[in-house]
Amino acid sequence: MVARRPLARHCSRTRCRPDGTGSAEFQVLGKHFLSVTISLENARRSPRTPSATTSTVNPTYQLRFANSRSEVEAAQRLRHEVFSAELGAVTTGRPGRDEDPFDDLCDHLIVWQITPGVLDPDADGTPDASTSTEQAVATYRLLPPNANDATPRSHGLYSSGEFNLEPLEHLMDSLVEAGRACVHPDHRNGATMALLWGGIARYMQLGGYRYLLGCGSVSLADGGAEAAAVWDVVRRNNMGPVRHWCSPRKPWHVPAVQAEPTAVPALMKGYLRLGATIVGAPCHDPGFNTADLLILLDLEDANERYLKFFLGAGA
């Protein structure tokens, strides 16, 4: 849905290279709040063999907030494809969609893969707009503080179903909750993640928000070995102040296994690189078969190098 706050009415542009495959352009757009286009200069060609008279055009990624019901539904279908079809999670909503009541309160950030169409070498070299396509390939939803009117306000967040958030009640006026993050398996690359993080950083900056709250999930499909290893890493290196710790409503009991060294999941690593901390013990989410860690980022304590990267050099 569109944002429910006074939006920036100026434009600013910066350029960066999210993963070396192309260039990205950020543009603040008034009503749409943010649009980002990234050109994939080294993108692989379509697997289809072009005919002798046409050639394919490299696809681009574009980041924008959903501005219509159909765009929100595209994000819901992507979430269902990743969470249910790929990962086997039990989700709510109509067939083929992952949806819940929070969707109507949130701003939905979506990365689209846009394929402009085909080029006709006998024409003027302009892509045929009638053959262009766009596909939602990554998404994040953001719940801003003015969309949360619960009492106490910590009860109005999705993650309140997993954690007692009352220790964070005093942060609610400037806290955005991020959740339902997913990326299509064919697009799990540096470009899509950089776009999502760049969009969230701009959203926080232009909205004047200080705190970002989210959950990092680790699959329990292996019996909990990976989750135990990740917990062993973060509890030694990334725990926040005790005053912010939130108790899980359904604690995940770490199995008595030897925690082998493992990589922290990419999404969680993104938070931690920015300077986020873990604010509680793991919660068990049986619907997704995951151990969830509550993550809090204070932008005033954020890693300036990474923050400037996501905001762009001109920030």
Image (spheres, helix red, strand yellow):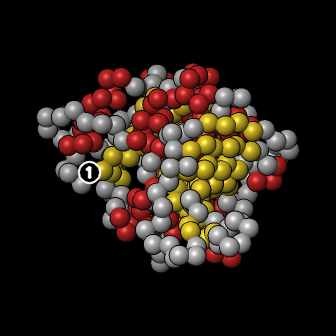
Q: Quadrant of residue 233?
A: top left
Q: Position of residue 288 (x, y in %)?
A: 36, 58
In the rendered image, the quadrant that contains the C terminus is top right
In the rendered view, does 202 fall on the left or right side of 304? right
Q: Indicate the position of residue 62 as horizontal and vertical percent values.
A: 63, 54
Depth order, front residue of 49/229: 49
The image shows residue 179 at horizontal and vertical percentages of 52, 50
Mark 1 burial class by Cα count in 10 Å: few <14, some 14-19, many 20+: some
Residue type at mark 1 is Leu
Residue 37 position (above or below residue 48): above
For this view, does 245 lie left or right of residue 197?
A: left
Relative height, residue 111 to residue 124 (above, below)? above
The residue at which mark 1 appears reads as 220
Q: Is residue 154 above or below residue 124?
A: above
Location of residue 19 in the rendering, given as x and y in whole percent from the top left corner: 50, 40
Please report the residue visible at 63 percent of the width from the left and 43 percent of the height from the top: 24
